[in-house]
Amino acid sequence: MKTILVTGAGGQLGRCFRKQGLKFPNFKFIFCTSKELDITSKNKLRSEISRHKPDVIINAAAYTNVELAETEKEKAYLVNAEASANLAEICSEKDIQLFHFSTDYVFNGKASEPYSEKDEVDPINVYGASKLAGERKIEEKLEKHFIFRTSWLYSEFGHNFFNTILKKADEKAELNITSSQTGTPTNANDLAEFVLKVIESGSEKYGIYHFSNLGEATWYDFAKEILDYSQKIDEVVLNETGFYKTKAERPAYSVLSKEKARNTFEFEIPHWKESLHRLIDEN
């Protein structure tokens, strides 16, 4: 039985791993929240990993506030880069597989077709740069790693676009949603299930992979679909806007190509609308 330690277990992705993990009774899970296991402290990290002796570590801990990262650069790099280096170094020492997550924001958004893993990276905000730095530190220190770049994560857990739109609908708010960015909404439950199936397969095809749901959308498209399918479209005033002022620059186009992941792991990835509808039906 494989022992899997999940960091950042109190966050959105960590909670999805807890939920999806119920489908994998052949795994022993150790879930550690950021309060229980601070991955920025190498000594504490080494001590906890030595105590639990996992075969696999899933690093679901991250600094994800894109806006705040512009003014909290040191903190973003500490969690997304230096802590990733800590994990990679200890995993290398103890022969542990590391599963880590990165972002579509490592790209500059100037492409006109989905980004592959071979495309040039060029982040245009601090968050994307800090995640890219984490990728490179892991590649440098650890052979047995899987890095999954993903995009626009949402779920029923925590603070995310999906939950915010539903909350605003309940408040009968007026919403101004941008159509100036195109990407792919990704149900974090799908990502968690995919990763657990990769672990179950015993794959050693290490490296960087892209994983998001299929299709593409703007934030306006995403909001409209949430409201339409949940039958709350008449409860809000939904406005499409081409401009939305933010501190952090965002890539205009950040759709990820999933061909490498689909061909390597033979996993059927659902379309973003299909996955969104399923989540709304379940909740």
Image (tube, rainbow, N blue to C red):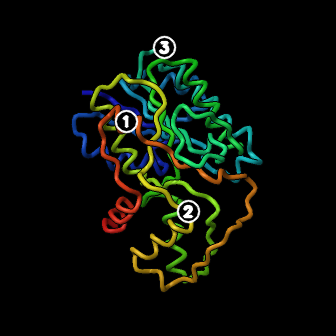
Which residue sits at x=67%, y=34%? 78
For the view shown, which residue lies furthest in the front direction? 112
Q: Image check: 83 left or right of 57? A: right
State the quadrant of the C terminus.
bottom left
Q: Amino acid at mark 2?
A: Thr
| Residue 209 against residue 230 in the figure, above or below | above
| Spatial separation of the CA atoms under disc 2 and disc 1 | 37 Å
Helix, strand or loop at label 3? It is: helix
Which residue sits at x=45%, y=53%? 186
| Residue 277 against residue 120 in the figure, above or below | below
Q: Earlier in the sequence, mark 1 or mark 3?
A: 1
Marks 3 and 1: in contact by CB < 8 Å?
Answer: no
Q: Amino acid at mark 3?
A: Glu
Instruction: Give residue 218's mark.
Output: 2
Which residue sits at x=42%, y=51%? 213
Graded by Cα atoms within 10 Å as few (under 14), some (14 to 19) or many (20 or more), the crowding at tag 3 reads few
Instruction: Give residue 93's mark.
Output: 3
Q: Amino acid at mark 1?
A: Ile
Q: Earlier in the sequence, mark 3 or mark 2?
A: 3
